[in-house]
Every structure is written in structure tokens, then in C-alpha cells.
Amino acid sequence: MAILAGQSAAASEEQVFADRTIAAFQGQPGALLGILERVQEHHPHKYLSPQILEYIAEQTDIPLARIYSVVTFYALFNLEPQGEHTICICRGTACHTRGSRNLLQRLRLDLGLPEESEDGADKLCATTPDRRYSLRTVACFGQCALAPVVEVDHAIYGHMNEQALHREVEHLAGRKS
């Protein structure tokens, strides 16, 4: 029973935050994107649960199907719990030709994440079992002159190589969240 009470308190706090966020964006163009982004960022695991999406739909009178279409269209939204730290590797053409595939393979190995799928697809969003790290790929950051480009906890790093990426992850490992 105590677990359920704790879950209800967490859900209630999340709903209170959502209510404040919805009120802050009332009547603004593009309000839904802002609401979803803030609610996701507020969640300890940086994702949008089905329950909070339903709640936002109810409170904004926006159909749930429309909310899901927005959340699944934009890569910045997560429907699964994310790690404390996020590492995102660009897989665009410029980054690919300058070694981003090797960066991705090395980081998968370092973090103990599964190998790429058999179809060779480079799209990835995986979180380590301890929820310490999430590894993602994007089609392009739009920073082609800096290729290969990697984003670590929202900081962009250009001209990345395997050794420098390994050092960044080691730095994250030593840092408390």
C-alpha cells in the first residue's frame, strides 16, 4: 500500500507541474511543444509517460492522438525512461564519412549496449540497465563543418574522436548527478 501511495504522490506532483506549465503556455503559439518539453525535462528520467500524456490531453482538450503524433515526430521527446546522462552521435553524411560509425560502435562497447541490428540501421536509442547513460543517434545536427559531432548532456563537441569521446564518458562517470 505504501508503494501505491508513493506512486500517487509522484503522479500528483507531476500533474501539478503539468498544470502550472499548461497555464504558463496558455494561448501561446506552439504551446504544445513547450508544454511537452518542460514536462519531460521535469521528470527525473526525462521522458513522457502514457499517464502524463493522457493528463495533458485532458487538460488542454487536445486529442491524445495529436499529442502522440507530435511526440513521435520530434526526436527530442522520449517515451521510455532515459539515463542520467545522454550521449547523442550524429549519423549524417558528413559525420559518417568522418568516422561517426566508429564512435557509435566504440561507445556501445564501452557502455555494454547491444550491437547494431541485423538490418544495419543506425537509428538508436538505448539506455544502460543502470539508467546511468542513454545513447542516441540523430540524422544530422546541422554542424557538418565540425564533423563528426557528438552531443553530451546538451553540450556539442565537434571533430570528435574515439579517445576524446572515451574521456568525456569517463568524466561523466566521475561526476555525481
Image (spheres, rainbow, N blue to C red):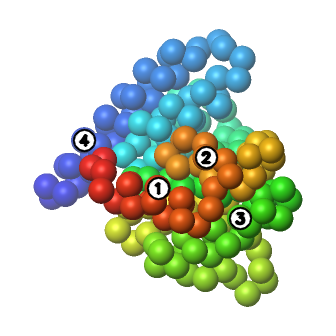
The residue wearing badge 2 is 157
Q: How far apart are the alpha carbons under marks 4 and 3?
A: 43 Å
**Mark whose residue sits in front, 4 or 3:** 3
Which numbered disc flags the more N-terminal residue, 1 or 3? Answer: 3
Q: How far apart are the alpha carbons under marks 2 and 4?
A: 39 Å
> Which quarter of the figure has residue 119?
bottom right
**Dot 3 crowding, Cα within 10 Å, few <14, some 14–19, many 20+:** many
Task: Identify residue type, mark 2.
Answer: Tyr
Asked whether the beta carbons under mark 1 and mark 2 sit within 8 Å of each other, the answer is: yes
Image location (x, y in percent) of residue 54: 54, 43
Asked whether the beta carbons under mark 2 and mark 3 sit within 8 Å of each other, the answer is: no
The residue wearing badge 4 is 9
Asked whether the beta carbons under mark 1 and mark 3 sit within 8 Å of each other, the answer is: no
Label 1, secondary structure: give it. Answer: helix
Image location (x, y in percent) of residue 34: 60, 27
Q: How far apart are the alpha carbons under marks 1 and 4?
A: 36 Å
Disc marking residue 100: 3
Task: Identify residue type, mark 4.
Answer: Ala
The residue wearing badge 1 is 168
Please tell me whether residue 151 is drawn above or below residue 34 in the rendered image.
below
Question: Taking 130 as reference, is 72 left or right?
Answer: right
Residue sitting at x 72%, y 56%: 148
Question: Taking 118 as reference, is 155 left or right?
Answer: left
Q: Quadrant of the N terminus?
A: bottom left
Q: Residue furthest bottom?
A: 118
Residue sitting at x 49%, y 46%: 153
Q: Residue furthest right?
A: 93
Q: Is residue 81 visible?
A: no
Task: Identify residue type, mark 3.
Answer: Ser
